[in-house]
Image (tube, rainbow, N blue to C red):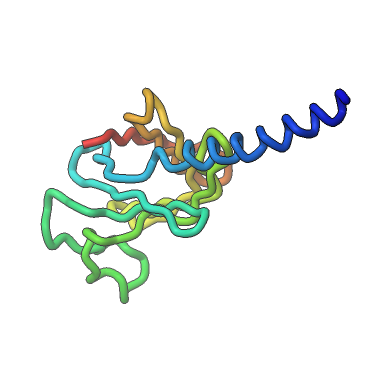
Amino acid sequence: MKTLLYLFMTTLLVPTISLANNSNADVILGEWLSQEKDGKISIFKQGDKFYGKISWGKTPGKKDVNNPDPKLKNRDIVGLVILQDFKFTGSTWEDGKIYDPKSGKTYDCIIKSKDNNKILEIRGYIGTPMFGRTATWTRP
C-alpha cells in the first residue's frame, strides 16, 4: 500500500515540478535595459533555447563597425541578436554566447536572475566563468 501511495504521489508531483521549472525559465523573457542604459535587449525563446536582440539604442543607425567579418560591419546594431543558444539549468541560463558589438568579440556566457527577476547578471567569459566580466541589466 505504501509503495502504491508513493508511486501515485510521485506521478502527481513530477509534472508539477516540471511545469514550475518551465515557468521559472521564462522569467527572463521581455525587455531589459543595458548596464550603461544605452540600449534595450529583448529576450525571447525559440524551442527550449533563449536568445536576445537589441531592440533599441541611443544612437539610431549605428553600425556593427567592430565586427571582425568585413561583410557584417555595415549591419545595424538595432535588431542584432547578441544572446544565443541559452539553456535553462534550473537556476541559471548557460551554454550560450554573447556578442559584444562594442568590441566585435563573442564570449561564452551565463545569465542569472536576481532581485525577484528585476535584475539580470550577464557574465561573459573566455574558458571559465572565473575569468570573466559581469554586466547588470535591469527592467526598463
Q: Residue at coordinates 45% horizontally, 52% vertically from top-left?
A: 50
Measured from the top left, where is residue 94 in percent x and y? 53, 44
Q: Residue furthest bottom?
A: 71
Quadrant showing the N terminus: top right
Q: Looking at the image, can residue 84 be seen?
A: yes
Residue at 22 percent across and 59 percent down: it is 78
Q: Residue 73: x percent and y percent?
A: 27, 69
Instruction: Tell me if residue 1 comes above or below residue 112 in the rendering.
Output: above
* Above or below 79: residue 93: above
Q: In the rendered image, is residue 130 in sight? A: no
Horizontal side, residue 20 vs residue 139: left or right: right
Query: Which quadrant is the C terminus positioned in?
Result: top left
Task: Say how many tags the image has.
Answer: 0
19 or 9, nearer to the observer: 9
Above or below: residue 51 compared with residue 128: below
- Between 46 and 108, the one lying in front of the other is 46
User: For this view, does 14 lie left or right of residue 40?
Assistant: right
Question: Residue placed at 33% from the left, 33% from the top?
Answer: 136
Residue drawn at (42%, 32%) of the image: 113
In which quadrant of the rendered view does residue 123 lie? top left
Q: Nearer the viewer, residue 84 or 45?
A: 45
Q: Quadrant of residue 15?
A: top right
**Relative image position of residue 57 (x, y in whole percent):** 17, 51
Where residue 87 appears, as percent x and y from the top left, is 53, 48
